[in-house]
Image: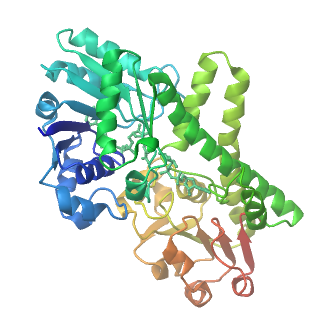
Amino acid sequence: MKSKEICCIGAGYVGGPTMSVIANNCPNYNITVVDSNESRISEWNGPVNDLPIYEPGLKEIIAKVRGKNLVFSNEVENSIKKADVIFIAVNTPTKTHGEGKGMAADLTNIEKCAKLIAESSSSGKIIVEKSTAPVGTGKKIKSVLNKENSKVKFQIVSNPEFLAEGTAINDLMNPDRVLIGGEQSEEGHKAVNTIADIYRQWLPENKIILTNLWSSELSKLASNAFLAQRISSINSLSALCEKTGAKIDEVSKSVGMDSRIGSKFLQPSVGFGGSCFKKDILNLVYLSRYYGLQEIAEYWESVLKINDYQKSRFYDKIQNTLSKTENPTVSIFGWAFKKNTNDSRESASIEITRKLLNNNFTVKVYDPMVKEKTIIKDLQDVLNNKLNKLTVCSSAEKALKDSHAICILTEWDEFKAMNFKNLSSLMKEPILFLDGRNIISDNKLNRTFKKFMSIDK
Ligand code: NAD
Ligand code: UDX
């Protein structure tokens, strides 16, 4: 069988792991991952222990396939030219200016890719929308391609990605489903099948769902909205637990044991983070408003309101407990938005730390995986003189020295295993232990710290 040439534009949290897993499962496909960010590509080509993305299991796959049927390259045009299939896996952040500012997805990166594909193509290609984008994006890509290059035939396919960071490799190897949407024409069906053939190399037919383009695009936004809505639901109840004395873990377990509801995504937290949930819900809200569906927009917007409320509620606990402490110092444990990733996008730690610094707290941060330069970048909108009050520490011990409070914000296993009773002797005064992930037992700590607080107390 002739090798098929795949190009993926975007070497990020989706492009890198997804193409690695495809390369590993499909030896007959040659895959080139390209990116406009040259340093990212050189990191992908560097030592496997220092890849730009940390994902359990990723470096082992990279070590196996890189340089064989998986290549990371800066040669964007050339890679597009020779490809039969092009995945677009670029970032689609919330717009920061223009119409839809703060709500709609910014499709500039996707549009740039479409233009470049049109300019660089001399033979027909299937363009796969891997990035999460609003309903209608496939149609937009097609109109850019046709406008810029009427000589070549392009087919557009939507194949949204459902991986979660921290479990990406397992999610890609054993997905609940793979969704592929295409145009309702003979050519469209053929293109959808070509993409399905890739996944058929390691997945059974019943895991592959074929739909039209628009259902596929909307299903992705809907899935993220449903997941986030469950977290906001359980977090909203944690506030009620705090008032009534009910325990949120007990409520979560009881509710989740109803097989109609299920136990996943009912873990209370200081608020969901990550690059997807907020952005995709804002996008859904914008779309609903655009179509005049005000009630629908408000319904989904409330999921985000509860998430903000949860973070404020958590910050208030720190503020209220340490209001009389002189030069209050807080140790933040965890910067990643969840465990097993080095990604901190939209992490609750950013907002809590920003508020602490702006209110003159001294903050010491420790995270096992997120680099100092990322933490500093995340806080770039905090005034410079406030940043003097921030220290990024290389160990938990260093982060605890001279502090008054510990806040657990990421559920790293390393934190679960720590003996905080012993570690508290390093602190200036153990006033507050705040568990934002409900992962630490309060049995001993409530005698060590003046206050032991969590999501529900
Ligand atoms: P990312 O920021 O990690 O990576 C995107 C990459 O695309 C960057 O390296 C950037 O330099 C590159 N890029 C942007 N424009 C480019 C262009 N014109 N030419 C070449 N390269 C370009 O983003 P991500 O987390 O991988 O997300 C990508 C898409 O997948 C987004 O739409 C996101 O919503 C969606 N998604 C993300 C996840 C996740 O867990 N991160 C999961 C599912 C879907
Ligand atoms: C999410 C979706 O799960 C994934 O399908 C999609 O492709 C991308 O967006 P991701 O953001 O990587 O994945 O991680 P996820 O596991 O969904 O966690 C998102 C946030 O919710 C994290 O901050 C996590 O800590 C939080 N969370 C998750 C909770 O607070 N409680 C839970 O029960 C689950």
Residue occupying the point 73% across, 64% down:
253
* 75 with respect to 268 (left or right): left
Give the image quadrant in which the ligand numbered 1 is located. top left
Q: Is residue 145 above or below residue 346?
A: above
Residue occupying the point 38% across, 17% down:
140
- The percent position of residue 15, horizontal first and vertical second, equals 31, 44
Residue occupying the point 58% across, 25% down:
286
| Nearest to the observer: residue 132 or residue 275 | 132
Q: Quadrant of the N terminus?
A: top left
Q: Is residue 102 visible?
A: no
| Nearest to the observer: residue 251 or residue 200 | 200
* 225 with respect to 444 (left or right): left
| Nearest to the observer: residue 130 or residue 368 | 130
Which residue ends up furthest to the right in the rendered image?
244
- The percent position of residue 98, horizontal first and vertical second, equals 47, 21
Quarter where residue 418 is shown: bottom right
* 322 with respect to 65 (left or right): right
The colouring scheme, among rainbow, by chain, secondary structure or one colour, is rainbow
Quarter where residue 297 is shown: top right
- The percent position of residue 326, horizontal first and vertical second, equals 66, 73
Q: Is residue 193 above or below residue 256?
A: above
Q: How many marks?
A: 0
Residue occupying the point 33% across, 30% down:
193
Q: Is residue 349 visible?
A: yes
